[in-house]
Amino acid sequence: MHARLLSAANEDGFTLLEMLIVLVILSMTFSVASARFVNRPDHVSPAQFIEGLATSLAAERNLALSIGEIKDVIINLENRKIAGATFTIPIPDQLNVKLTIGRELLTEDKKGIVRFFPDGSSVGAEIKASVPGSTLSSLAKVNWLTGIITTEEQVN
């Protein structure tokens, strides 16, 4: 029985330390590679921008549902920023963004408000992103009754 233990200890394989070193090297490589692609807001397509915005809007709606409070998302087209309680998204310079909301949700300083209520509903909105000169655009729709956000691509 003692001979089996010795032979098992001499088998080829990787130690825990070797595996940890490989994991550290891989994670550093992936973090550098992903940072190259993620932190490029100036090279975002309309579809990528709208998908990211839709995800952030859905998170804001879920926050309103979970804590039972009204949550507003402020869309400032002049300063090219969209901000909620949990996020701030810069609007890339190469994109044209158009906001369609009710007149009562436009502030005096020309900021639009997309409001989510604790029951899941919202005030409704449409946010359209396009590249100048392109016939393709992407649209995020916030349903006023359900607050659910949908996205679609359009040909102008």
Image (tube, helix red, strand yellow):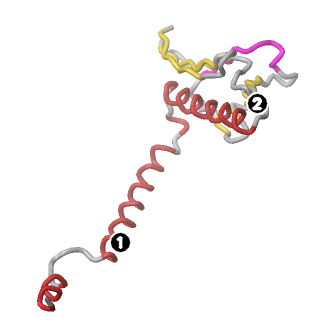
Q: Position of residue 10 (x, y in %)?
A: 15, 84
Q: Label 1 belongs to which residue?
A: 21
Q: Residues within 10 Å of mark 1 (few under 14, many from 20)?
A: few
Residue 123 in magenta stretch: no
Is tag 1's residue or tag 2's residue first in the polypeptide sequence?
A: 1
Looking at the picture, tell me which residue is in the foreground, 43 or 122.
Answer: 122
> How many angstroms separate mark 1 from mark 2 (CA)?
45 Å
Q: Residue at x 48, y 16 (%)?
A: 153
Q: Is residue 76 visible?
A: no
Tell me the magenta residue range. Answer: 96-106
State which quarter of the image contains the N terminus: bottom left
Rendered position, 66 above or below 15: above
The three-letter amino acid code for the residue at tag 1 is: Ile
Residue positioned most to the bottom: 2
Q: Is residue 106 visible?
A: yes
Q: Residue at x 72, y 26 (%)?
A: 119
Looking at the picture, tell me which residue is in the foreground, 100 or 69.
Answer: 69
Residue positioned most to the front: 1
Give the left or right position of residue 48, taking residue 140 as reference.
left
Q: Residue at x 76, y 35 (%)?
A: 68
Rendered position, 33 above or below 75: below
Looking at the picture, tell me which residue is in the foreground, 92 or 72.
Answer: 72
The three-letter amino acid code for the residue at tag 2 is: Asp
Give the left or right position of residue 45, taking residue 92 as reference.
left
Give the left or right position of residue 53, taking residue 80 as reference.
left
Q: Label 2 belongs to which residue?
A: 72
Looking at the rendered structure, the secondary structure element under dot 2 is: strand
Q: Residue at x 40, y 60 (%)?
A: 27
Looking at the rendered structure, the secondary structure element under dot 1 is: helix
Looking at the picture, tell me which residue is in the foreground, 44 or 60.
Answer: 60
